[in-house]
Image (tube, helix red, strand yellow):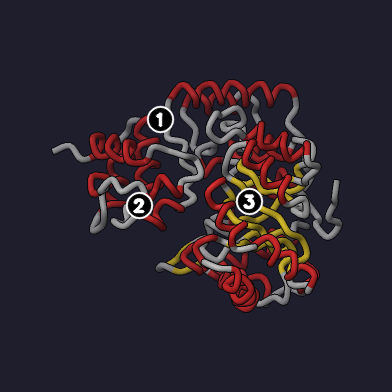
Amino acid sequence: MQTFPDIKKNFGFGCMRLPMKDGNVDNELFCQMVDEFMEAGFNYFDTAHGYLGGKSEIAVRECLTSRYPRESYILTNKLSSNFFEKQEDIRPFLEEQLRICGVDYFDFYLMHAQNKKLFEKYKKCRAYETAAELKKEGKIKHLGISFHDTAEVLEEILTAYPEVEVVQIQFNYADFEDASVQSRKVYEVCRKFKKPVIVMEPVKGGSLVNLPAEAQAIFAELGGGSNASYAIRFAASFEGIFMTLSGMGNLEMVRDNIGYMKDFRPLDEKEMEAVGKVCKIFHAQNLIPCTDCKYCTERCPKNIPIPSLFSCMNDKIAFNNWNSGYYYGVHTEGGAKASDCIGCGACEAACPQKLPIRKLLRDVAAAFEKK
């Protein structure tokens, strides 16, 4: 299996949930976060053109690439389907990404959010072949994919394009045996094809950090790390996983994560047993398994803040306190509510988790919009 000696540690900085201030990335805070991350010996950063409405790439340039030598960090970017319609669009798009990020090459370039439907578009536009050409020219060092679909579809992609070097998958203890996400089965396909794995969503968009009281008590008995530490170390414990990403929004997250990943150790037997118990509690509560990727909001014609409203619903299910209703009001004040859904289905077509979003929005409206 291929290795990547330039990568110093097995933990990376995901730049999809950066700290914000007045509608823009808080560059002063992000610079501090980058500095502490790098000083601790980590050097892997992951972004995409659509993250934070285009502001993630700019922040990466202003807080990372303009401040550190190019050889000191690893930068991953992605070819997202929203930004090309034909093969001729791909090269100019990548060159624009390089310009915005302030670099001459990307260490990893991923075909973004591959599923069965999108894969057909990428094949039709010869996206994989074009990326391979850009790799020969030195504008990409390693070609990979990020993936959201079944194990069967991943096997199809890796069979068609054996030149794919890495696969980024959603992998966490809550999704490990989930029938829709298929984390374990997808991981096993990566192992079958000897592809190194990058983990995204190890804390499931925060769902594995803010735990129900019953689950919290189980981890508290261990007398050790944070909830995030058990989730991220679970993902990083598996053979063949060379990078585990975390989207960090403040210094406390950075410090907590590097504290247990700097001298990484896999979960021991007692910790694994605790994780299994927490899993059972989550599955029993019937929470909405939204990861806050926001692909749905990009497609919604009514601009409904779907992940935020689902988060309110999960909070109501898990804690049943006043906070969920309060924050529902915060997220919908002056904007679209769950009941504004027109049922077009564009959100469901974009959802990597295959959630029945229209039905769930009706449930949310019933829970929060009582007259």
Residue neighbourhood size for the residue with mark 1, other residues' Cα within 10 Å, grouped as few (<14), some (14–19), many (≥20): some
Q: Relative to 309, is 2 on the left or the right?
A: right
Q: Secondary structure at mark 3?
A: strand
Q: Looking at numbered disc 1 in the image, what kind of residue is underneath it?
A: Ala
Tell me if residue 61 can be seen.
no
Q: How far separated are the C-alphas under marks 2 and 3? A: 24 Å
Residue 46 x, y percent position in the rendering: 64, 59
| Viewer-nearest residue: 136 or 363 | 136
Q: What residue is shown at x 20% (from left), y 40% (from top)?
A: 369
Where residue 233 appears, x then y in whole percent? 69, 38
Question: Helix or strand or loop: what does disc 2 sit on?
Answer: loop
Mark 1, residue position:
318
- The residue lying at 54 percent from left, 24 percent from top is 217
Q: CA distance from mark 2 to mark 1?
A: 20 Å
> Marks 3/1: CA distance?
31 Å
Residue 85 vs residue 13: left or right?
left
Q: Which comes sooner in the sequence, label 3 or label 1?
A: 3
Task: Say which residue label 3 marks.
Answer: 146
The amino acid type of the residue labelled 3 equals Ser
Question: Which residue is drawn at the image coordinates 65% and 42% (left, top)?
Answer: 154
Residue 221's tag is: none
Kindly identify which residue carries mark 2.
Answer: 305
Give the position of the C terminus as an image quadrant.
top left
